[in-house]
Amino acid sequence: MSTNTSFLESSHVIPDVLPQSTKLSGDLIIRWPDTILDSPGLELGREETQHEPTIQLKPPPEDRHNNYVLILVDPDLMAKNDQQFGQVRHWLPTNISLGDGGNLHIPKDGIISPYIGPAPLPNYISKRPHRYIFILSQPKNNQAVTIENEDLTKLQGDYSAAFEGVQGQQDLKDRWGFNSQKFLEEKGLETVAVTFMLVAGTLKSAADNIAMTAQAGVNKVLGK
C-alpha cells in the first residue's frame, strides 16, 4: 500500500492541485504505445503521450469498485499553478471498473471529457515543463457519480481568464477553469492514487496549443 505523499509535496502537487489531507492507497502506472509512466515525476516526450493511455492500479484492492473517476489536469497553462486560467482538464472518464491485475476499464459512455494529449508552450517561450497530474478517485458511498455540464462550468467562475463555453463542447474553453480539489469535494470523491508526468513544449505542441485556442474562440463567437 502506498500512503507516502512526499512526492506530491515536493513537486507542489500538494497544495497546488490536491489538499494537504490527501491520502493514497495505491499507485498508478500509465502506459502509451511508446512510453510508460511507472514512477511519479518522469519527464516524457510530448509526441509519445498523444494517444489515450491504459491505466493500472497497483496493488489491486480487495474490494473492487465499478465507479472510479479519473481526472487528468495541467495546472500550469500560462504559469506554474496558473491562477488566471485555472487547471486544464485533459481527461475525465467516469464509471471506471477494475479488471484483472488492477487494469482499469473505461467505458465509452462514461467519458465526460475525452483524452487530449499535452500541448505545452515551447521551451523558448516558457522554460518549464508542465505537470500533468493523474488522479484516480472513488465515491465515498460507492454509488455512481453523476456529472452535469453545469458542474464543470460552475468551477470556471473562480478564474478571471477562463470564459464559459457552450456546455458539452469540450473544446479548450470548456476545459480550462477546472479545479480538481473543489470537484472532488463537491462530488464526494476520495483520492485513491495519484501520479504525474512532466512534459516540455515543442514547436508542434505550440502550434497545437494555438490552434485549440483559436478554435475555442471561434466556437465561442459562433455559439457552438
Image (cartoon, rainbow, N blue to C red):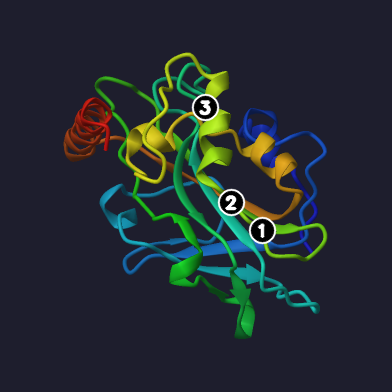
As drawn, the label of residue 147 is 2
| 71 is higher (above) or lower (below) than 125 | below
Quarter of the image that includes the C terminus: top left
Q: In the figure, residue 223 lies in which quadrant?
A: top left
Residue 168 pos. (x, y %): 40, 46
Residue placed most toward the observer, 41 or 210:
210
As drawn, the label of residue 156 is 3
Residue 33 pos. (x, y %): 33, 69
The reply to whether discs 2 and 1 touch (Cβ–Cβ < 8 Å) is: yes
Q: In the figure, residue 43 lies in which quadrant?
A: top left
Identify the residue shown where x is 58% and y is 40%: 151
Using the numbered discs, state the Cα–Cα distance from disc 2 to disc 3 in whole angstroms.
15 Å
Q: Earlier in the sequence, mark 3 or mark 1?
A: 1
Residue placed most toward the observer, 193 or 88:
88
The reply to whether discs 2 and 3 touch (Cβ–Cβ < 8 Å) is: no
Q: Could you tell me the amino acid type at mark 1? A: Val
| 186 is higher (above) or lower (below) than 191 | above
| 59 is higher (above) or lower (below) than 215 | below
Looking at the rendered structure, the secondary structure element under dot 3 is helix
Looking at the rendered structure, the secondary structure element under dot 2 is loop
